[in-house]
Image (cartoon, helix red, strand yellow):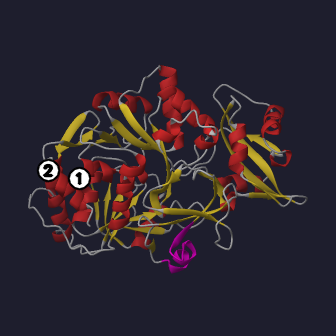
Amino acid sequence: MNLANLLMRIAKRLPERPALAHGNRELYSYRELAHRVCTLSGALRDRFALRHGDRVGLFMHNCPEYLEILYAVWHAGLVAVPINAKLHPKEVQFILDDAGVSLLFVADDLDVPTLAEVVSVASAQYRALFAAGAQAAMGPYTPGDLAWLFYTSGTTGKPKGVMLTHDNLLAMTQCYFTDVDTVTMNDSTLYAAPMSHGAGLYNLPHVLAGARHVVPESGGFAAEEIIELGRRYGKLSMFAAPTMVRRLVDHCASHGCDAQGIKTIVYGGGPMYVEDIRRALQVMGQRFVQIYGQGETPMTITALSKFHLAQTEHARYLELLGSVGVAQSAVEVRVVDADGSDVSPGESGEVIVRGPTVMRGYWNNPGATAQALRDGWLYTGDVGAFDDDGFLTLKDRSKDIIISGGSNIYPREVEEVLLMHPAVAEVSVVGRPSAEWGEEVVAFVVCAEGKSVATDELDALCLAHIARFKRPKEYRVVPALPKNNYGKVLKTELRQALASK
């Protein structure tokens, strides 16, 4: 089914319900939003002569126009190529060229790459696309059509275009209701994380339920603004990276905010350490859900629900907090060894996934597709272990495992311990070549504001909680950790820093 049907149906059923707001300002009802989408869909086909399957780029900060363009692209039978607004122009140009983008929608303040057809959403040209007001019929659709061509962050090489179909994203949407959270027409969803990524994908369950979509005036994450919008609208849900959660929790703790207007914060996209989620629950209460997914199976591998996070009486509660939850309802998840055989509970191996959410493959990259998709399973490259209850704990990316003296060391295990120190705000652990051991552990530590920490304190902490061979051989205190546009720590840059000294 074409995803644009979700909007068209709710516009008929709940035409006057508020659909889109910009900060405190209500913009459109569902009837009005659907009208704009149908009009823009016609312009895409008539004015720009786009045809079924053509690619349309969205290179913008979060803005109200994002949703109407996205749904117009689908309504017209085209493919959306969302591009993170923080990317370098060369990175953007690579995506445009690789995807064969025919038309690009941009924001005025961005450095626009070379392309024949570029439309700024702030221009008279964009406004003119709605002038005719003609209601175009939905474009052609066939099962398996692409909906979203998502380019990976490219931290280890050139980005790859993940081909996600309408059916992939519909299955993801159904998982949201079953495994993540309920949504009603009285709810609102806030776009504080990039709409070019997971936050944008989560528009779908909220459109299906007829909820309100709120784009903050800042266009991104601002803790005070989020709290105010929660009070303004109530029953507010949002997707956030763990770094955003920490900042929001810090704000609430320092300002005494009750955060009552916030219904649900879905977090994912990077490791959430046990101490961080414990503090989040203490400060903001039971309003968190963790999801684990990849661009290749968006938002849909496992989930750690509010119910799970509230099980404080569980005999292994801290282990549960450190997990990423249980398999989502539409997918099968296994942990396998190098031969593809299942490992026993408690043993580590590669996480693999099968189900209707898994991508069709990588755009124009059959070699990478064959590497990732084998015998119907997506090989994620993540290392994890199931417990006896079916909870999955991620150890690390397979490329990040440190092998020292023939023993595997999982950086996250060391990071969890170091974050127990009250003076440590962030930490990232990587391996450094060692003539004696093969590799040795190095920890990059960011201190909390106004605090410092001594190496012997960190050493003592590690020796009290993990095996001696796992403790770092060196601690480097740094002002900040290098991160990509989605907030993930770039361990490749940390390794490069070690190699250059």
Question: Relative to the observer, which residue lies in front, 77 or 105?
Answer: 77
Q: Amino acid at mark 1?
A: Ser
Q: Is residue 173 above or below residue 147?
A: above
Separation of disc 2 and disc 1 at Cα?
33 Å
Q: Position of residue 72 (x, y in %)?
A: 23, 61
Q: Which residue is mark 1?
A: 123
Q: Position of residue 165 (x, y in %)?
A: 36, 68
Q: Secondary structure at mark 2?
A: helix
Which mark lies nearer to you, 2 or 1? 2
Identify the residue at horizontal 58%, vertical 49% (top origin). 483
Q: Earlier in the sequence, mark 2 or mark 1?
A: 2
In the picture provided, is 204 more to the left or to the right than 396? Answer: left
Q: Position of residue 438 (x, y in %)?
A: 84, 61
Question: Marks 1 and 2: in contact by CB < 8 Å?
Answer: no
Look at the image and say whether residue 366 sits in the magenta stretch.
yes
In the picture provided, is 412 more to the left or to the right than 162? Answer: right
Identify the residue at horizontal 15%, vertical 65% (top origin). 42
- Count the marks: 2
Magenta stretch bounds:
365-379
Label ID, residue 13: 2
Identify the residue at horizontal 34%, vertical 59% (top origin). 58
